[in-house]
Image: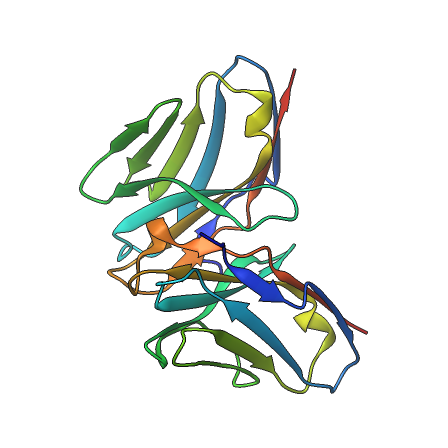
Amino acid sequence: KAGVTQTPRYLIKTRGQQVTLSCSPISGHRSVSWYQQTPGQGLQFLFEYFSETQRNKGNFPGRFSGRQFSNSRSEMNVSTLELGDSALYLCASSLEIGSYETQYFGPGTRLLVL
Amino acid sequence: DQQVKQNSPSLSVQEGRISILNCDYTNSMFDYFLWYKKYPAEGPTFLISISSIKDKNEDGRFTVFLNKSAKHLSLHIVPSQPGDSAVYFCAAQTGANNLFFGTGTRLTVIP
């Protein structure tokens, strides 16, 4: 069974631009969660989607948004990029919402904002 | 404000010895705690968890202890092996809601 895939793996943007990251979950998984990892803050939960609906949301500004498609694939968008948005963005998929023990993480997208 | 804290960014341990990774939290509503391990260039993988109704959970070489009164949990690895070298994150949640992670502790097991 293929794992969670994220594209692109690396990305360089400049301040003010917007970016879209993509996540393909494991086949059959309906829940997709997004996380931001930075050296100072560690891993922070962004949001969780299940059946195309956002079910949980972390404490991030509205510039961070996401969506999920009918095939469970998910995208995350960050608008008006700031230097502090430079981070590793991880997505994770699981069969059910809130199944954090059995969520599988992708390798992440490393975003650098200049 | 960081609700889950791992105050030791790094830890070095000799192979065969015990590794103890610590985690503190501030929210008394957390009822489930998890530990994840992360190797470079890979996503985190689930390691072990504990419910707030327990004070200990063991899985092979890994044991997690929970002290609710102190809002503290720890992960013990005995014996430590070089393959355990990774970054360890503790996380906490309430119900089926958001996970709050600590900042991670980098464990190095010296052969």
x and y percent of residue A78 in the render?
A: 61, 81
Within the image, what quadrant is residue B100 found in? Answer: bottom left
Considering depth in this image, is B44 or B102 the residue closer to the camera? B44
Considering depth in this image, is B27 or B91 the residue closer to the camera? B91
Q: Judge from the rendering whether residue B15 lies leftward or rightward of residue B63; answer left or right.
A: right
The residue positioned 34% from the left and 49% from the top of the image is A101
The residue positioned 55% from the left and 61% from the top of the image is A5
Compared with B18, B35 (above or below) is: below
Q: Residue furthest left?
A: B53
x and y percent of residue A50 in the render?
A: 34, 73
Compared with A48, B43 (above or below) is: above
- Quadrant holding the C terminus of chain A: bottom right
The residue positioned 48% from the left and 59% from the top of the image is B2
Q: Judge from the rendering whether residue B61 lies leftward or rightward of residue A113; answer left or right.
A: left
x and y percent of residue B78 in the render?
A: 44, 18
Q: Residue furthest front?
A: A1
Q: Judge from the rendering whether residue A84 lies leftward or rightward of residue B88; answer left or right.
A: right
The residue positioned 53% from the left and 81% from the top of the image is A61
